[in-house]
């Protein structure tokens, strides 16, 4: 199965992630098992990843040059979707924290993964509203909002990968605004060559890129983003990328954004290396 088929396989599962779907945070030994999964992913050890994932309810699909691990969205452990290339040690993580909420961010993320051999794909396994109590109002009240909840499996795995030095590119979406197509930020982390490369390539692709503390997009900078905070603590690169709806709904623009991101990762962070077979 080729990269395009793998991406299509994963994307087909996203509509099943429902706002009122089931979800619970990990408990007991599950955080340690998530650490074991992250270590296997960082080492490109497919066998270890399958073993660790099975303990967490992740089904494994061998797609030839790729391994897909994913939760059942109908169960309370609707935690993760991961795509890795066995034996290729990842140089970066492409993250989709809000699938089926920030529409088509998974399409962009999977295309980046397809184009960038050194990338690992990490997606939340539930809609950001899943498992929330009826009176939930603040982002921290939503247990499946993985960009706001440090106790989420997504945050646990991402944090473990960041501790190993992997940079992150995290995709979000916003409603169209008249003066910007893409908003880029390092979150709580400092700026980086990767952030600069992404900004340059997106501008070259014709997108209007917003950066810095401008009032027009100051609400889109992800300063409290959990993965960005982890990156700041470890001194690794974090790219918080918000895409306007018009960009996400246009196939040509999605592809151009994905090509820009993959190019930036290849320039700076994403070159593959031989790992554990």
Image (cartoon, helix red, strand yellow):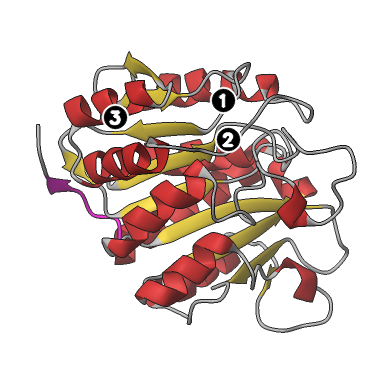
Position above or below: 269 against 171: below
On the image, numbered disc 3 is attached to which residue? 52
- Who's the residue at 34% across and 55% down the image? 160
Residue at 57%, 59% (x, y): give it: 205
Q: Which secondary structure type mostly characterizes the magenta part of the structure?
A: loop
Q: Residue at x 61, y 43 (%)?
A: 254
**Distance between mark 3 and mark 1 Cα atoms:** 23 Å
Looking at the picture, tell me which residue is in the foreground, 216 or 166: 166
Q: Sequence order check: which comes first, mark 3 or mark 2?
A: 3
Q: Residue furthest front?
A: 28
| Element under disc 3 | helix
Q: Are marks 1 and 2 in contact (CB under 8 Å)?
A: yes
The CA span between labels 1 and 2 is 7 Å
Q: Which mark is residue 90?
A: none
**Image coords of residue 8 (percent x, y):** 51, 21
Q: Which residues are magenta?
A: 269-274
Q: Where is residue 75? Give x, y as percent.
A: 60, 18
Residue at the disc numbered 2: 107
């Amino acid at each position: 199965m080729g990269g395009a088929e793998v991406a299509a396989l994963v994307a087909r599962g996203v509509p099943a992630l429902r706002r009122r779907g089931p979800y619970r945070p990990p408990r007991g030994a599950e955080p340690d098992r998530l650490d074991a999964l992250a270590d296997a992913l960082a080492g490109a050890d497919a066998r270890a990843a399958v073993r660790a994932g099975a303990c967490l309810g992740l089904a494994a699909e061998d797609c030839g040059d790729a391994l897909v691990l994913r939760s059942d969205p109908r169960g309370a452990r609707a935690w993760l979707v991961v795509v890795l290339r066995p034996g290729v040690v990842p140089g970066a993580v492409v993250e989709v924290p809000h699938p089926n909420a920030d529409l088509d961010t998974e399409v962009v993320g999977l295309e980046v993964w397809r184009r960038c051999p050194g990338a690992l794909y990490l997606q939340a396994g539930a809609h950001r509203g899943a498992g929330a109590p009826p009176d939930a109002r603040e982002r921290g009240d939503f247990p499946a909002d993985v960009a706001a909840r440090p106790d989420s499996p997504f945050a646990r795995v991402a944090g473990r990968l960041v501790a190993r030095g992997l940079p992150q590119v995290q995709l979000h979406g916003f409603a169209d605004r008249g003066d910007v197509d893409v908003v880029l930020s390092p979150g709580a982390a400092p700026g980086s060559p990767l952030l600069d490369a992404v900004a340059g390539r997106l501008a070259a692709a014709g997108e209007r890129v917003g950066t810095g503390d401008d009032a027009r997009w100051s609400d889109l900078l992800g300063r409290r983003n959990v993965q960005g905070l982890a990156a700041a603590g470890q001194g690794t690169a974090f790219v918080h990328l918000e895409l306007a709806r018009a960009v996400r709904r246009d196939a040509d623009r999605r592809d151009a954004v994905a090509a820009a991101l993959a190019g930036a990762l290849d320039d700076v962070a994403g070159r593959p290396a031989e790992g554990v077979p």
